[in-house]
Image (spheres, grey):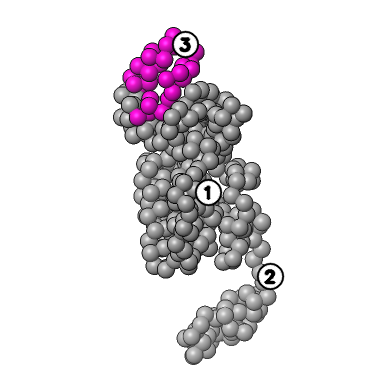
Amino acid sequence: MKRLLICLPFLLMLASCSGMPKLFWDVDEGKDQPAYAGAEGGSQAASRPPLTVPPELRSELELPEGESVGTQEQGPVAEKYRKAVAGKAVRLDARLYENREPAELFSAVVDAMTAMNVPLDSVDSPSGIITSDWIRQGSTSSYILFGFGGNKLTRYKYLVRVYRAKGKDGVSGTQLEIRTIGQVFETGQGWVTKPIKNKPVNELFDAVGEQLARVKPQMKQHAPAAKPEAAADAKSPEDEALAAIEAWRRAWSARDAEAYLAAYASDFEPPHGFATLGDWQAYKKRVIASKSFIEVTLEDAIATRQPDGSVSVEFLQHFRSNNFNSDDRKRLVLKKIGPEWKIIRETSL
Protein backbone atom coordinates (compact mmCIF):
# COMPACT_ATOMS: atom_id res chain seq x y z
CA MET A 1 0.00 0.00 0.00
CA LYS A 2 2.84 2.40 0.84
CA ARG A 3 4.51 1.58 -2.47
CA LEU A 4 1.27 2.43 -4.33
CA LEU A 5 0.97 5.79 -2.56
CA ILE A 6 4.59 6.57 -3.42
CA CYS A 7 4.15 5.63 -7.15
CA LEU A 8 0.87 7.51 -7.65
CA PRO A 9 2.37 11.05 -7.45
CA PHE A 10 5.15 9.93 -9.77
CA LEU A 11 2.62 8.76 -12.40
CA LEU A 12 0.66 12.03 -12.11
CA MET A 13 3.85 13.97 -12.67
CA LEU A 14 4.67 11.95 -15.80
CA ALA A 15 1.16 12.40 -17.21
CA SER A 16 1.47 16.18 -16.91
CA CYS A 17 4.55 16.23 -19.13
CA SER A 18 3.81 17.40 -22.67
CA GLY A 19 5.96 14.75 -24.26
CA MET A 20 4.23 11.80 -22.58
CA PRO A 21 1.14 10.02 -23.90
CA LYS A 22 -2.09 10.89 -22.14
CA LEU A 23 -2.75 8.45 -19.26
CA PHE A 24 -5.98 9.85 -17.77
CA TRP A 25 -9.17 10.94 -19.60
CA ASP A 26 -12.20 13.05 -18.68
CA VAL A 27 -15.47 11.23 -18.06
CA ASP A 28 -17.18 12.49 -21.28
CA GLU A 29 -14.06 12.61 -23.42
CA GLY A 30 -14.10 10.43 -26.51
CA LYS A 31 -17.86 9.82 -26.71
CA ASP A 32 -18.51 11.90 -29.81
CA GLN A 33 -15.09 12.18 -31.42
CA PRO A 34 -11.51 10.94 -30.96
CA ALA A 35 -9.26 12.94 -28.69
CA TYR A 36 -7.02 14.02 -31.55
CA ALA A 37 -9.99 15.91 -33.06
CA GLY A 38 -10.37 18.11 -29.96
CA ALA A 39 -8.48 21.25 -28.99
CA GLU A 40 -6.60 19.72 -26.07
CA GLY A 41 -5.86 16.14 -27.06
CA GLY A 42 -5.31 17.06 -30.71
CA SER A 43 -3.07 20.08 -30.35
CA GLN A 44 -0.04 18.17 -31.49
CA ALA A 45 -1.73 16.69 -34.60
CA ALA A 46 -3.32 20.03 -35.47
CA SER A 47 0.08 21.71 -35.45
CA ARG A 48 1.50 19.34 -38.07
CA PRO A 49 1.91 20.71 -41.62
CA PRO A 50 -0.54 19.37 -44.23
CA LEU A 51 0.49 16.33 -46.25
CA THR A 52 2.28 17.26 -49.48
CA VAL A 53 1.43 15.01 -52.46
CA PRO A 54 4.25 14.65 -55.01
CA PRO A 55 3.34 15.91 -58.53
CA GLU A 56 3.82 12.45 -60.04
CA LEU A 57 1.02 11.11 -57.81
CA ARG A 58 -1.49 13.79 -58.76
CA SER A 59 -4.01 12.97 -61.49
CA GLU A 60 -4.24 15.38 -64.42
CA LEU A 61 -7.99 16.01 -64.27
CA GLU A 62 -10.08 18.56 -66.14
CA LEU A 63 -13.71 18.41 -65.13
CA PRO A 64 -15.96 18.31 -68.22
CA GLU A 65 -18.07 21.34 -69.04
CA GLY A 66 -21.18 20.53 -71.06
CA GLU A 67 -20.67 23.02 -73.88
CA SER A 68 -16.93 22.35 -74.28
CA VAL A 69 -16.82 18.56 -74.52
CA GLY A 70 -15.44 17.25 -77.80
CA THR A 71 -15.28 20.71 -79.38
CA GLN A 72 -11.83 20.29 -80.89
CA GLU A 73 -11.52 19.05 -84.46
CA GLN A 74 -11.75 15.29 -84.72
CA GLY A 75 -8.81 14.50 -87.04
CA PRO A 76 -5.99 12.24 -85.81
CA VAL A 77 -5.46 11.81 -82.07
CA ALA A 78 -2.90 14.27 -80.65
CA GLU A 79 0.64 12.94 -80.26
CA LYS A 80 0.60 13.22 -76.46
CA TYR A 81 -2.39 10.85 -76.34
CA ARG A 82 -0.96 8.45 -78.92
CA LYS A 83 1.94 7.89 -76.51
CA ALA A 84 -0.56 6.81 -73.84
CA VAL A 85 -1.44 3.73 -75.90
CA ALA A 86 1.85 3.26 -77.73
CA GLY A 87 2.50 -0.41 -78.50
CA LYS A 88 2.31 -3.09 -81.15
CA ALA A 89 -1.17 -4.31 -80.25
CA VAL A 90 -3.23 -1.13 -80.08
CA ARG A 91 -6.86 -1.99 -80.69
CA LEU A 92 -9.40 0.53 -82.00
CA ASP A 93 -13.17 0.07 -81.62
CA ALA A 94 -15.78 2.71 -82.41
CA ARG A 95 -19.54 3.24 -82.21
CA LEU A 96 -21.79 6.12 -83.26
CA TYR A 97 -24.54 7.17 -80.84
CA GLU A 98 -27.19 9.01 -82.86
CA ASN A 99 -29.01 12.01 -81.38
CA ARG A 100 -26.58 12.19 -78.44
CA GLU A 101 -24.56 15.25 -77.47
CA PRO A 102 -20.80 14.84 -76.77
CA ALA A 103 -21.33 16.00 -73.17
CA GLU A 104 -23.96 13.27 -72.62
CA LEU A 105 -21.74 10.51 -73.97
CA PHE A 106 -18.65 11.85 -72.20
CA SER A 107 -20.48 11.84 -68.85
CA ALA A 108 -21.84 8.33 -69.52
CA VAL A 109 -18.30 7.05 -70.23
CA VAL A 110 -16.97 8.57 -66.98
CA ASP A 111 -19.85 7.01 -65.00
CA ALA A 112 -19.40 3.64 -66.73
CA MET A 113 -15.66 3.50 -66.06
CA THR A 114 -16.23 4.52 -62.44
CA ALA A 115 -18.87 1.80 -62.01
CA MET A 116 -16.43 -0.75 -63.45
CA ASN A 117 -13.66 0.39 -61.03
CA VAL A 118 -11.52 1.64 -63.92
CA PRO A 119 -9.42 4.57 -62.61
CA LEU A 120 -9.45 7.86 -64.55
CA ASP A 121 -5.86 8.97 -65.14
CA SER A 122 -6.65 12.13 -67.13
CA VAL A 123 -9.86 13.79 -68.34
CA ASP A 124 -9.52 16.31 -71.19
CA SER A 125 -13.01 17.61 -71.91
CA PRO A 126 -12.23 19.93 -74.90
CA SER A 127 -10.57 17.02 -76.70
CA GLY A 128 -13.22 14.61 -75.42
CA ILE A 129 -10.45 12.25 -74.26
CA ILE A 130 -10.09 10.09 -71.15
CA THR A 131 -6.95 8.06 -70.41
CA SER A 132 -6.23 5.36 -67.87
CA ASP A 133 -2.98 3.57 -67.03
CA TRP A 134 -2.62 1.30 -64.02
CA ILE A 135 -1.18 -1.99 -62.76
CA ARG A 136 -3.03 -4.83 -61.07
CA GLN A 137 -1.81 -8.13 -59.62
CA GLY A 138 -3.50 -11.50 -60.08
CA SER A 139 -6.81 -12.47 -61.69
CA THR A 140 -9.00 -12.63 -58.60
CA SER A 141 -9.94 -8.94 -58.60
CA SER A 142 -13.62 -8.02 -58.91
CA TYR A 143 -13.02 -6.75 -62.43
CA ILE A 144 -10.13 -7.37 -64.81
CA LEU A 145 -10.54 -5.27 -67.93
CA PHE A 146 -8.57 -7.24 -70.46
CA GLY A 147 -9.25 -10.79 -69.29
CA PHE A 148 -5.70 -11.96 -68.69
CA GLY A 149 -5.41 -14.97 -66.41
CA GLY A 150 -2.78 -16.10 -63.92
CA ASN A 151 -1.36 -14.34 -60.91
CA LYS A 152 0.84 -11.97 -62.88
CA LEU A 153 1.18 -8.21 -62.85
CA THR A 154 -0.94 -6.78 -65.63
CA ARG A 155 -0.68 -3.24 -66.96
CA TYR A 156 -3.63 -1.59 -68.64
CA LYS A 157 -3.53 1.42 -70.95
CA TYR A 158 -6.80 2.84 -72.08
CA LEU A 159 -7.72 5.84 -74.27
CA VAL A 160 -11.35 6.81 -74.83
CA ARG A 161 -12.31 9.56 -77.28
CA VAL A 162 -15.65 11.32 -77.80
CA TYR A 163 -16.44 13.75 -80.65
CA ARG A 164 -19.38 15.02 -82.69
CA ALA A 165 -20.07 13.05 -85.87
CA LYS A 166 -22.76 12.12 -88.40
CA GLY A 167 -24.11 8.75 -89.49
CA LYS A 168 -24.46 7.49 -93.06
CA ASP A 169 -27.98 8.93 -93.30
CA GLY A 170 -26.83 12.36 -92.13
CA VAL A 171 -28.23 12.03 -88.59
CA SER A 172 -26.12 13.95 -86.07
CA GLY A 173 -24.70 12.17 -83.07
CA THR A 174 -21.49 11.46 -81.16
CA GLN A 175 -18.72 8.98 -81.96
CA LEU A 176 -17.10 6.93 -79.20
CA GLU A 177 -13.63 5.52 -79.94
CA ILE A 178 -11.85 3.13 -77.57
CA ARG A 179 -8.14 2.45 -78.00
CA THR A 180 -6.78 -0.28 -75.76
CA ILE A 181 -3.47 -1.96 -74.99
CA GLY A 182 -2.68 -4.61 -72.38
CA GLN A 183 0.70 -5.76 -71.09
CA VAL A 184 1.70 -8.64 -68.79
CA PHE A 185 4.92 -8.55 -66.77
CA GLU A 186 7.06 -11.58 -67.67
CA THR A 187 10.10 -12.41 -65.55
CA GLY A 188 13.25 -11.67 -67.51
CA GLN A 189 11.34 -9.92 -70.29
CA GLY A 190 9.60 -7.01 -68.59
CA TRP A 191 6.27 -5.75 -69.91
CA VAL A 192 5.02 -7.89 -72.81
CA THR A 193 2.15 -6.62 -74.96
CA LYS A 194 -0.81 -9.01 -75.30
CA PRO A 195 -3.70 -8.89 -77.81
CA ILE A 196 -6.98 -7.46 -76.53
CA LYS A 197 -10.08 -9.67 -76.55
CA ASN A 198 -13.55 -8.68 -77.77
CA LYS A 199 -15.38 -9.21 -74.49
CA PRO A 200 -13.79 -6.50 -72.29
CA VAL A 201 -14.29 -3.77 -74.90
CA ASN A 202 -17.89 -4.84 -75.47
CA GLU A 203 -18.47 -4.75 -71.71
CA LEU A 204 -17.46 -1.09 -71.64
CA PHE A 205 -19.75 -0.31 -74.58
CA ASP A 206 -22.58 -2.11 -72.73
CA ALA A 207 -21.87 -0.16 -69.54
CA VAL A 208 -21.97 3.11 -71.48
CA GLY A 209 -25.28 2.05 -73.04
CA GLU A 210 -26.72 1.37 -69.59
CA GLN A 211 -25.72 4.85 -68.43
CA LEU A 212 -27.23 6.48 -71.52
CA ALA A 213 -30.49 4.55 -71.08
CA ARG A 214 -31.06 6.46 -67.84
CA VAL A 215 -30.95 9.85 -69.58
CA LYS A 216 -33.18 11.14 -72.37
CA PRO A 217 -31.30 12.43 -75.44
CA GLN A 218 -30.58 16.15 -75.25
CA MET A 219 -30.00 16.54 -78.98
CA LYS A 220 -33.07 17.65 -80.90
CA GLN A 221 -34.12 15.03 -83.42
CA HIS A 222 -34.73 16.90 -86.67
CA ALA A 223 -36.36 15.24 -89.62
CA PRO A 224 -33.97 15.30 -92.61
CA ALA A 225 -34.72 18.13 -95.01
CA ALA A 226 -36.46 17.11 -98.20
CA LYS A 227 -34.00 16.87 -101.09
CA PRO A 228 -34.20 15.72 -104.66
CA GLU A 229 -33.66 11.97 -104.75
CA ALA A 230 -30.51 12.20 -106.84
CA ALA A 231 -28.96 14.81 -104.54
CA ALA A 232 -29.87 12.86 -101.39
CA ASP A 233 -28.09 9.75 -102.67
CA ALA A 234 -25.04 11.61 -103.99
CA LYS A 235 -21.76 10.71 -102.26
CA SER A 236 -18.23 11.78 -102.96
CA PRO A 237 -15.82 9.29 -104.55
CA GLU A 238 -13.83 9.32 -101.30
CA ASP A 239 -16.91 8.32 -99.28
CA GLU A 240 -17.78 5.54 -101.71
CA ALA A 241 -14.22 4.20 -101.66
CA LEU A 242 -14.17 4.19 -97.84
CA ALA A 243 -17.50 2.34 -97.79
CA ALA A 244 -16.04 -0.28 -100.15
CA ILE A 245 -13.03 -0.74 -97.87
CA GLU A 246 -15.30 -1.15 -94.85
CA ALA A 247 -17.18 -3.94 -96.69
CA TRP A 248 -13.80 -5.53 -97.55
CA ARG A 249 -12.76 -5.37 -93.87
CA ARG A 250 -16.03 -6.95 -92.67
CA ALA A 251 -15.78 -9.78 -95.20
CA TRP A 252 -12.19 -10.50 -94.15
CA SER A 253 -13.11 -10.49 -90.44
CA ALA A 254 -16.04 -12.83 -91.18
CA ARG A 255 -13.67 -15.25 -93.03
CA ASP A 256 -15.90 -14.89 -96.10
CA ALA A 257 -13.30 -15.59 -98.80
CA GLU A 258 -15.70 -15.07 -101.71
CA ALA A 259 -16.86 -11.64 -100.54
CA TYR A 260 -13.30 -10.69 -99.61
CA LEU A 261 -11.90 -11.55 -103.06
CA ALA A 262 -14.89 -9.91 -104.77
CA ALA A 263 -13.59 -6.58 -103.44
CA TYR A 264 -10.65 -6.80 -105.88
CA ALA A 265 -10.83 -5.84 -109.56
CA SER A 266 -10.25 -8.39 -112.30
CA ASP A 267 -7.10 -6.47 -113.27
CA PHE A 268 -5.77 -6.30 -109.68
CA GLU A 269 -1.98 -6.45 -109.58
CA PRO A 270 -1.01 -9.46 -107.40
CA PRO A 271 1.97 -9.09 -105.02
CA HIS A 272 5.47 -10.17 -106.00
CA GLY A 273 5.89 -13.94 -105.96
CA PHE A 274 2.57 -14.77 -107.63
CA ALA A 275 2.62 -15.44 -111.34
CA THR A 276 -1.09 -14.86 -111.88
CA LEU A 277 -4.08 -13.37 -110.11
CA GLY A 278 -5.53 -16.90 -109.84
CA ASP A 279 -2.47 -18.10 -107.90
CA TRP A 280 -2.84 -15.25 -105.42
CA GLN A 281 -6.59 -15.87 -105.01
CA ALA A 282 -6.00 -19.58 -104.29
CA TYR A 283 -3.36 -18.64 -101.71
CA LYS A 284 -5.70 -16.18 -99.94
CA LYS A 285 -8.45 -18.82 -99.78
CA ARG A 286 -6.06 -21.29 -98.12
CA VAL A 287 -4.88 -18.70 -95.59
CA ILE A 288 -8.41 -17.62 -94.64
CA ALA A 289 -9.54 -21.25 -94.28
CA SER A 290 -6.60 -21.99 -91.95
CA LYS A 291 -7.75 -19.44 -89.35
CA SER A 292 -10.26 -20.28 -86.62
CA PHE A 293 -10.96 -16.56 -86.27
CA ILE A 294 -9.91 -13.32 -87.94
CA GLU A 295 -10.33 -9.80 -86.63
CA VAL A 296 -9.32 -6.78 -88.69
CA THR A 297 -9.56 -3.17 -87.50
CA LEU A 298 -8.51 -0.05 -89.42
CA GLU A 299 -7.27 3.18 -87.87
CA ASP A 300 -6.91 6.74 -89.21
CA ALA A 301 -8.04 6.01 -92.78
CA ILE A 302 -7.39 8.93 -95.17
CA ALA A 303 -8.88 8.90 -98.70
CA THR A 304 -7.38 11.01 -101.51
CA ARG A 305 -8.81 11.40 -105.02
CA GLN A 306 -6.22 10.93 -107.79
CA PRO A 307 -6.08 12.82 -111.13
CA ASP A 308 -7.12 9.67 -113.03
CA GLY A 309 -10.34 9.39 -110.98
CA SER A 310 -9.12 6.61 -108.70
CA VAL A 311 -9.04 6.99 -104.91
CA SER A 312 -6.01 6.17 -102.75
CA VAL A 313 -6.72 5.22 -99.12
CA GLU A 314 -4.01 4.95 -96.45
CA PHE A 315 -4.60 3.49 -92.98
CA LEU A 316 -3.08 1.54 -90.09
CA GLN A 317 -4.30 -2.06 -90.20
CA HIS A 318 -4.48 -4.30 -87.10
CA PHE A 319 -4.79 -8.00 -88.01
CA ARG A 320 -5.53 -10.58 -85.29
CA SER A 321 -6.06 -14.33 -85.62
CA ASN A 322 -5.50 -17.55 -83.69
CA ASN A 323 -1.99 -18.05 -85.09
CA PHE A 324 -0.81 -14.72 -86.52
CA ASN A 325 -0.96 -11.03 -85.54
CA SER A 326 0.32 -7.97 -87.38
CA ASP A 327 0.11 -4.17 -87.42
CA ASP A 328 0.86 -2.65 -90.82
CA ARG A 329 0.52 0.66 -92.62
CA LYS A 330 -1.28 0.05 -95.93
CA ARG A 331 -2.35 1.86 -99.09
CA LEU A 332 -5.23 0.61 -101.24
CA VAL A 333 -6.02 2.17 -104.61
CA LEU A 334 -9.60 1.78 -105.83
CA LYS A 335 -11.34 2.63 -109.08
CA LYS A 336 -15.01 2.65 -109.97
CA ILE A 337 -16.03 -0.23 -112.24
CA GLY A 338 -19.69 0.10 -113.14
CA PRO A 339 -21.59 0.92 -109.93
CA GLU A 340 -18.92 -0.48 -107.57
CA TRP A 341 -15.50 0.53 -106.33
CA LYS A 342 -12.84 -2.20 -106.65
CA ILE A 343 -9.28 -2.55 -105.34
CA ILE A 344 -6.70 -2.38 -108.14
CA ARG A 345 -3.51 -2.08 -106.06
CA GLU A 346 -2.50 -2.98 -102.49
CA THR A 347 0.78 -1.85 -100.94
CA SER A 348 2.37 -2.22 -97.50
CA LEU A 349 4.09 1.05 -96.53
Query: Does 52 sit above or below residue 244?
Result: below
Question: Dots 1 and 3: beta carbons under 8 Å?
Answer: no
Per the image, is 272 magenta? yes
Foreground pick, 314 / 186: 314
Foreground pick, 132 / 199: 199
Residue drawn at (33%, 26%) of the image: 258
* Residue 190 shows up from this direction: no
Which region is colored magenta? 259-287
Indicate left or right for 295 with 101 as reference: left
Quote the CA–CA distance across marks 3 and 2.
73 Å
> Residue 323 occupies which quadrant of the picture?
top left
Q: Which mark is residue 159?
A: 1
Q: Quadrant of the C terminus?
A: top right
| Amino acid beneath label 2 | Pro
> Residue 64 occupies which quadrant of the picture?
bottom right
Q: Which mark is residue 273?
A: 3
